[in-house]
Amino acid sequence: METMREIPLSSMSVHPGHPRSDLGNLDALVADVAAHGVIEPVIVAPGTRWLSTGKCADCGLRRRRHGSGVVEQHESSGRPCPGSGEPAADDWVLLAGRRRAMAATMACLETVPAIVRADLRSDADRLSLIARENLHRLDLTPLEVARLFGALTAAGLTSTRISQRVRVPKAFVDRRLRLLDLPSGVWGALRRGRVGLAAAEEVVGLEANPRRRGWGVAERCDVRP
């Protein structure tokens, strides 16, 4: 279930599983947002800060809310308030559109158009959407992808389920997950660009084979600080 509404930027927090560590240069996007506003909506879900109360989107008063982020049943002007059972209006988690949201903040906008996905209740559901949006639209590094798939694994998904939800081959998922097993020195070297992806993947293979472990790593990967 999706709904569209204007949401204050101040009420949004980025999902901690978001893989993008570098948003890149935002100057052109900020200028465009300042001139034309945010054209493509961001995607949010009810907040995950588990506040005991939240602002009702209909009557504007603070009311008790459930752990799922929706406001409990209540009355307004002596009648059942339409905001009952709806997400609290002051606590949202940003799932997609982080660059647009940041550009809007830098352009001094107060609100942005947002698609509300109240149906994404589990962390696996939310991380799956983040993965689909980022893998197909942004140039993530292999390590960022590995961390994202690792978060999905921690949320209870197998590599087969990740493949189905993110719509990428299972072999790709498995290869990226293996990067999480890299020795810290090789991980850092890959992050700094001192080691290529193919060489790093071979290191994981060597580590998994006791008979081959320890040979070839120094020649194939420069793991110096």
Image (cartoon, rainbow, N blue to C red):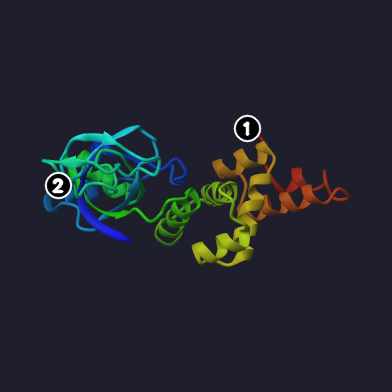
Of 162 and 138, nearer the camera is: 162
Hey, what amino acid is under mark 1? Pro
Which element carries disc 2, helix, strand or loop? helix
Q: Which residue is located at x 54 percent, y 66 percent?
A: 164
Of 63 and 173, nearer the camera is: 63
6 sits to left or right of 178: left
Q: Residues within 10 Å of mark 2 (few under 14, many from 20)?
A: some
Image quarter of the C terminus: top right
In the rendering, which numbered label is found on residue 225?
1
Whichever of labels 1 and 2 marks the residue nearer the N terminus, that label is: 2
Residue 174, quarter of picture: bottom right
Image quarter of the N terminus: bottom left
In the rendered image, residue 150, in percent from the top left (x then y), is placed at 58, 48
Q: Which residue is located at x 44 percent, y 40 percent?
A: 16
In the rendered image, residue 195, in percent from the top left (x then y), is placed at 62, 47
Q: How many marks?
A: 2
Q: Residues within 10 Å of mark 1 (few under 14, many from 20)?
A: few
In the rendering, which numbered label is found on residue 96?
none
Which element carries disc 1, helix, strand or loop? loop
Hey, what amino acid is under mark 2? Ala
Of 25 and 146, nearer the camera is: 146
Of 17 and 179, nearer the camera is: 17
Q: Residue furthest front?
A: 78
Tell me, yes or no, if residue 223 can be seen here.
Answer: no
In the rendered image, residue 13, in percent from the top left (x then y), is placed at 34, 39
Q: Which residue is located at x 76 percent, y 45 percent?
A: 217
Q: Which residue is mark 2?
A: 34
The label nearer to you, 1 versus 2, is 2
Q: Which residue is located at x 30 percent, y 39 percent?
A: 91
